[in-house]
Image (spheres, rainbow, N blue to C red):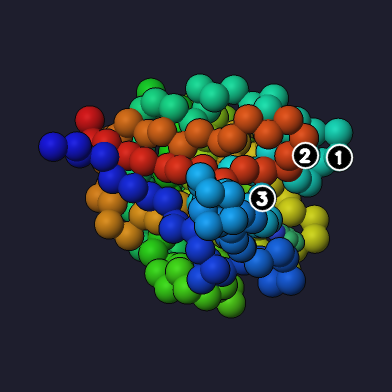
Amino acid sequence: MTRWIDISQPLDENVPVWPGDTPFSYRLTWTKEDTGSVNVGQLTMSTHTGTHIDAPFHFDSSGKKVIDLSPDLYLGPVRVVYLKHPQTIGPEELKGENLEGVSRLLIRTDTWLDRSSFPAAIPPVHPTLAPFLAERGIRLLGLDLPSVDPLDSKELPAHHALTSHGVHILEGAVLYRVEAGDYEMVALPLPLTEADGSPVRAMLRPI
Ligand SMILES: Nc1ccccc1C(=O)C[C@H](N)C(=O)O
Ligand SMILES: [Zn+2]
Ligand SMILES: [Zn+2]
């Protein structure tokens, strides 16, 4: 009946995290036996676990926090593009795509298919992609990768370029089952007033 496709990574202790970052944990603070009424859980996790969005505060101490980001960024039409195993993700790779009227873009690369471990290397987004997307009116870029920059980058040139061009970032989407095309998306962050990022439940429906 529902045609929604889940593009979120399931969250449990098997979800790989950024090397050295907080492991995911869900445990019961109280069991139904303890309370006589309910099980009550507790989550411990990095804000950059699984499918998540980055707030600018993640890499800019005066940048916006999650609560400051318009929910509209994460709700509505989205274009999915398939770039199979690219070396880098830049304007050159997207030149065959007509992105007219597109405001949200998801790029499937299939370079992180084993979601039980953190990748050794990823194709980085080239910072020149930021003005290219902004010129076309794109305000959200999502990828099936844990970062838009090389994993050892300290400067984070793509994060900064995207943000300074008004392009927001969604990372860790699970796209291997998703064909290129146009979809409706829901990928709302939690209303975290202080956070640098948020996990999202990301769903797509073909349109
Ligand atoms: N969790 C981390 C811990 C240490 C250093 C980086 C990260 C990151 O998450 C960076 C990545 N570019 C991200 O935005 O998700
Ligand atoms: Zn992140
Ligand atoms: Zn990031």
Q: Secondary structure at mark 3?
A: loop
Residue beneath disc 1 = 61
| Residue 166 makes an appearance in the image | no
Residue beneath disc 3 = 47
Whether residues under marks 1 and 2 lie with C-beta atoms below 8 angstroms apart, the answer is yes
- The answer to which of marks 2 and 3 sits earlier in the sequence is 3
Residue at 69% x, 72% y is: 19
Q: Secondary structure at mark 2?
A: helix
Q: Is mark 3 within 8 Å of ligand 2?
A: yes
**Front position in the image: 103 or 27:** 27
Whether residues under marks 1 and 3 lie with C-beta atoms below 8 angstroms apart, the answer is no
Residue 79, image x and y in percent? 35, 37
Q: Quadrant of residue 20?
A: bottom right
Mark-to-mark CA distance, 1 and 2: 5 Å
Name of the residue lying farthest toward the front: 36
Mark-to-mark CA distance, 2 and 3: 12 Å
Location of the C terminus (image quadrant): top left
Location of the N terminus (image quadrant): top left
Residue beneath disc 2 = 57
Residue 54, image x and y in percent? 65, 43
Is residue 6 shown above or below 83?
above
Residue 41, image x and y in percent? 58, 52
Residue at 32% x, 31% y is: 184
Q: Residues within 10 Å of mark 2 (few under 14, many from 20)?
A: some
